[in-house]
Amino acid sequence: MTRRPGFLVYGLLAAFVLGSTFPLYWSFLSGSRTQAEMSGGDPPLLPGGHFLDNAARVLDTVPFWKAMGNSLLVSGVTATSVVFFCTLAGFAFAKFSFRGRTPLLVFVIATMAVPTQLGVVPLFILMAKLGWAGTTWSVMVPWLVTAFGVFFMRQYLVDAVPDELVEAARMDGCSSFRTFLSVGLPAARPAAAILWLFTFMQVWTDFFWPLIALNSDNPTLQIALNQLQSGYFKDYSLVLAGTTLASIPLLVLFAFTGRQFVSGIMQGAVKG
C-alpha cells in the first residue's frame, strides 16, 4: 500500500491524458487554419494564425452568445433540478418504508430501458400544446428529474445515511422533508456533485432533442454549431473554431471545480 506507482502506471496515465486532450487540440489546430490550408492536406502540429479570424466569423455567422446563454441556462437549471429532485426521491427510496416501494423503484429503473426516441413525437405535441415549442422551457422541463439520477442517489444514500440518524431526527420532531434537508442532503453532497457535473455535461452536449424542440432563432450551442455547415459545402476551419469555442465553458468548469469534485469523492469514500 505504501509503494509508489511505477513507470508503467505513469506511462499509461500520460498516454490516456494525451489521447483525451488530442481531439481538442486538433480542433484548435484546424480552427486556426484557413479552408485553403485545410484542403491542402492535414495541418501541421503547430497552430496557425487565423483562429481569431475564424472565431470572429463564427460570431458573425450564428447567434453564438445567445446560444451559449441558452446552453448555460438550460444546463445549469436542469442539472440543479435533477440533483435536488433525484436526491429527494433517492432518499425516500433508501430510508423510508412505504407500500409499493420496491415495485415503484423497479418501474423507475425499467424506464431507463425505453429509448428516448420513442417519446419524441408525443413529447413535442405536448410542448406545442403548452405553448413551449421553440422556447428553452421545452428543453428544460422534460428532464428536470431522471430515472438514472434517482437510482444513483438511492444506491449512494442506502449506506451513506445510517438508519439511526434518521430515527434520531424523527425523535427530535423533524418532518420527513426536514429530515431530508438536515440529514439526507448534506450526506449526499459527494454523489450530488458528481451527478450535477454529469448532468450538466449531458445537457450541454445534447443535440437530438434541442434540434427538434428549438428553432434557428433561439438555439442552444450545439444547434448553433450545426448551422455553421451548409448542405453542399463545409468550412471545417469555421466549424472546428466554433467547436473549440463551445468547449471553453466546460474546460473552465473543470478547472474551477475539479478539486472540489475530487474532494467530495474522497469524503464519500472515507467512512468516519
Image (cartoon, grey):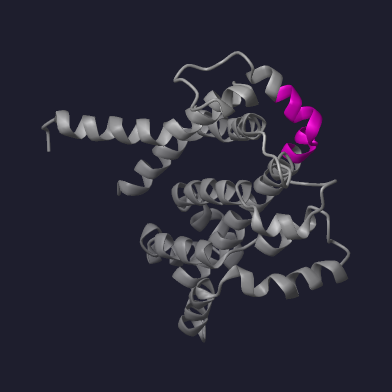
Q: Is residue 1 magenta?
A: no
Residue 145: x %, y % from top left? 62, 63
113 with respect to 237 (left or right)? left
Residue 211, quarter of the rendered image? bottom right
User: Chief secondary structure of the magenta span?
Assistant: helix
Q: Residue at x 70, y 43 (%)?
A: 71
181 with respect to 163 (left or right)? right
Residue 231: x %, y % from top left? 72, 47
Which segment is the magenta one? 55-68
Residue 38: x %, y % from top left? 57, 27
Image height of 115 relative to 141, above or below: below
Front position in the image: 236 or 261: 236
Residue 88, quarter of the rendered image? bottom right
Front position in the image: 99 or 75: 75
Front position in the image: 169 or 110: 110
Q: Determine if residue 272 is in view.
A: no
Front position in the image: 3 or 112: 112
Q: Determine if residue 186 is in view.
A: yes
Q: Residue at x 38, y 57 (%)?
A: 160
